[in-house]
């Protein structure tokens, strides 16, 4: 393995460890008072509605592209396009719960601007 590849892998591993440490540290903090939890629930509800709309749009565009590529080029190329659709939303789905839960905790910090 080249030195550059080892360095890149080490940096990636360090980033994963740092992210896990920060997530656990922040999620141990208090969620704040009842009013902050109500606001967070409303923001979460709106974000979920927006993201579901976005996922539906990606699915429709992906299906249309799949059919167009399949009919006008070949079905092997169309099938190779399918794995590219799913990763569009995977990172968003995995980070979303952490960001929602951490945002309310950071708002509840005593030093947070009011």
Image: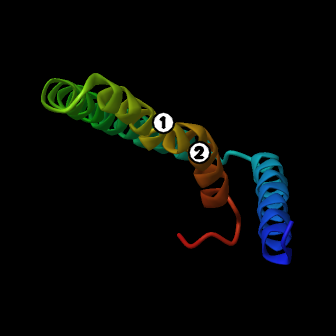
Q: Is residue 12 above or below residue 33?
A: below
Point out the tag, 1 or 2, that comes first from the N-terminus.
1
From the image, tell me which residue sits under label 1.
41
As drawn, the label of residue 13 is none
| Colour mapping used in the image | rainbow
Q: Could you tell me which quadrant the N terminus lies in?
A: bottom right
Along the horizontal axis of the image, is 7 left or right of 106?
right
Q: Position of residue 106 (x, y in %)?
A: 65, 59
Mark 2, secondary structure of its residue: helix
Q: Report which quarter residue 57 is drawn in.
A: top left
Q: In terms of depth relative to the viewer, which is nearer, 45 or 75?
A: 75
Between residue 22 and residue 17, name the one nearer to us: 17
- Label 2 Cα neighbours within 10 Å, binned few <14 / some 14-19 / many ≥20: few
Q: Quadrant of residue 43?
A: top left
Relative placement, left or right, of 78 versus 99 is left
Q: Residue at x 28, y 35 (%)?
A: 58
Q: Is residue 17 left or right of residue 54?
A: right
Q: Residue at x 59, y 39 (%)?
A: 94
> Measured from the top left, where is residue 3 in percent x and y?
86, 76
- Measured in 3D between alpha carbons, the distance from the residue under mark 1 to the one under mark 2, in whole angstroms, is 17 Å
- The picture places residue 5, in percent across and down from the top left corner, at 79, 68
The image's mark for residue 95 is: 2
Q: Is residue 102 above or below residue 3?
A: above
Neighbours of disc 1 within 10 Å: few (<14), some (14-19), many (20+): some
The x, y position of residue 74, in whole percent, is: 24, 27
Q: Is residue 38 above or below residue 25?
A: above
Name which residue lies at 44% across and 39% down.
Answer: 89
Of residues 46 and 60, the one nearer the viewer is: 60
102 with respect to 87 (left or right) = right
Q: Nearer the viewer, residue 30 or 27?
A: 27
User: Against 102, is 83 above or below?
Assistant: above
């Amino acid at each position: 393995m080249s030195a550059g590849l080892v360095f890149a892998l080490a940096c990636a591993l360090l980033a994963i460890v740092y992210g896990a440490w920060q997530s656990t540290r922040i999620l141990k903090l208090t969620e704040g008072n009842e009013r902050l939890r109500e606001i967070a629930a409303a923001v979460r509800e709106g974000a979920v509605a927006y993201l579901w709309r976005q996922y539906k749009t990606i699915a429709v565009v992906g299906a249309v592209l799949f059919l167009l590529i399949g009919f006008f080029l070949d079905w092997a190329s169309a099938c190779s396009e399918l794995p590219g659709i799913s990763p569009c939303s995977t990172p968003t789905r995995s980070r979303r719960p952490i960001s929602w839960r951490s945002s309310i905790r950071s708002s509840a910090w005593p030093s947070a601007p009011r």
